[in-house]
Image (spheres, helix red, strand yellow):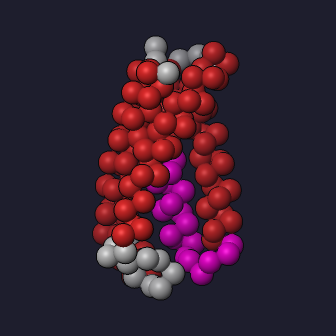
Amino acid sequence: MKKILLSGLVAGIVMLVIAVALSFAWQFIFPSVALEYATPLFRPWSDPLMSLIFVCPLLTGFFLAWIWSMVKGCHQGSASKKVLLFATGWTIFSFLGIFMTYSCFQMSFLMMLTWVLSSATQYYFGTWVLIKMNK
C-alpha cells in the first residue's frame, strides 16, 4: 500500500507539472484558446473552486498507481511498450469524456484537441514514473 501511495504521489506531481506547463504553452501557442477560457463557460481563477483543478492530476496519479499494481503482471515486454499500452488505454477513456464535453458545451475543436494531447502526455509520463518506481 505504501508503494502505491508513494508512486501515485510522485506520478501525480509529475502529471500536475506537465498539466500546468502545457496549459501555459497551449495558451501561448494558440491565443484563441486563452480567449475561450475567458468566456462564461469557464470559472475565473478568482473562484476558489478553481483550485480543484490542481487536485485532479494528484488523484489521477493515485488511481493510476492502484490500477497499475493490479495489472502490471498482465503487461509483457519492454518498459516503453508497457508505458505505451497502459497510457494509451487511459488516453482512450479520457478521450471519451472529453468528447462528451465537446458534444455538450460550446467549445472549439482546438480546445478539445489540446485537452486530448495534454491528457495523453500526462498519462504517458505518469505511467513511465509508475513503471520506473515499481520494477
Report how many numbered discs are placed on residues in the image: 0
Question: Magenta stretch mostly in which secondary structure?
Answer: helix
Residue 25: x percent and y percent?
32, 62
Image spot of residue 110 (x, y percent): 51, 70
Magenta extent: 103-120
Q: Is residue 117 magenta?
A: yes
Residue at the image position 64 percent from the left and 23 percent from the top: 71
- Vertical position of residue 68 compared to residue 47: above or below: above
Asked if residue 103 lies left or right of residue 77, the reply is right
Q: Pinpoint residue 118: horizontal percent, then vertical percent.
A: 46, 54
Q: Is residue 93 left or right of residue 57?
A: right
Q: Quadrant of residue 9?
A: top left
Which one is in front, 41 or 32?
41
Q: Residue at x 60, y 30 (%)?
A: 67
Relative to the observer, which residue lies in front, 88 or 98?
98
Residue at 65 percent of width and 47 percent of height:
92
> Can you say whether 53 is above or below 42 in the image?
above
The residue furthest bottom is 40
Q: Residue 127 lies in magenta, yes or no? A: no
Query: Residue 84 occupies which quadrant of the picture?
Result: top right
Q: Position of residue 114 (x, y in %)?
A: 48, 62
Identify the residue at horizontal 65%, vertical 58% (top origin): 97
Residue closer to the observer: 25 or 104? 104
Residue 32 at least partly seen: no
Query: Quick check: can you spot residue 33?
Result: yes
Residue 12 drawn above or below residue 73 = below
